[in-house]
Image: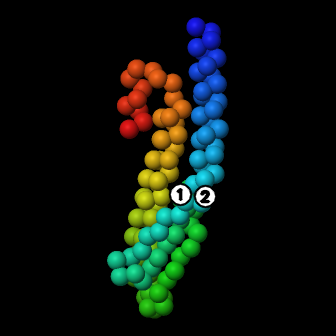
Amino acid sequence: MFGDMMGMMGKLKETQEKIKIAKERMHTILVDEKSSDGKLKVTLNANRVIKEISIDDELLADKEQLEDYLILVLNKAIEKATNVNEAELSAVAKDGMPNIPGMDSLFK
């Protein structure tokens, strides 16, 4: 039993390291989103950090319209980046978890 416990602790430590590496890698995974007409484009990384915003000059003339575009496009981009982030971390966590009956449903 003690050997099993040490093995599980080792596996958990290994999983923590893999999660750390995955979080660092997510700084390099880029997610792009744009408005339906292409006038506003946003790029985030998978850690939900905005890397670039491109605004068509036409949008600069109307503050309210620009604000609406920013809200819509940023929210879509954040949702996409969050989905990538969660999928990456879930895959690492699931791979590193010991096989405990009933626990597999937590990572689906």
- Where, quadrant-wise, is the N terminus in this rendering? top right
Q: In the depicted view, which residue is nearer to us: 28 or 34?
A: 28
For the point 53% across and 76% down, the residue is: 53
Amino acid carrying label 1: it is Ala
x and y percent of residue 29 in the render?
55, 60
x and y percent of residue 99 in the render?
46, 23
Structural crowding at the residue carrying mark 1, measured as other residues with C-alpha within 10 Å and reported as few (<14), some (14–19) or many (≥20): many
For the point 44% across and 91% down, the residue is: 58
Local SS, label 1 = loop
Q: Is residue 101 left or right of residue 31?
A: left
- Where, quadrant-wise, is the C terminus in this rendering? top left
Vertical position of residue 15 compared to residue 81: above or below: above
Residue designated by label 1: 46
Q: Is residue 87 left or right of residue 3?
A: left
Local SS, label 2 = loop
Vertical position of residue 102 compared to residue 91: above or below: above
Q: In the depicted view, which residue is nearer to us: 72 or 26?
A: 26
Residue 6 placement: quadrant: top right
Vertical position of residue 29 compared to residue 38: above or below: above
Residue designated by label 2: 27
Vertical position of residue 6 compared to residue 24: above or below: above
Q: In the depicted view, which residue is nearer to us: 51 or 59?
A: 51
For the point 53% across and 64% down, the residue is: 30
x and y percent of residue 39 in the render?
42, 83
Amino acid carrying label 2: it is His
For the point 61% across and 40% down, the residue is: 18
Structural crowding at the residue carrying mark 2, measured as other residues with C-alpha within 10 Å and reported as few (<14), some (14–19) or many (≥20): some
CB within 8 Å, label 2 to label 1: yes
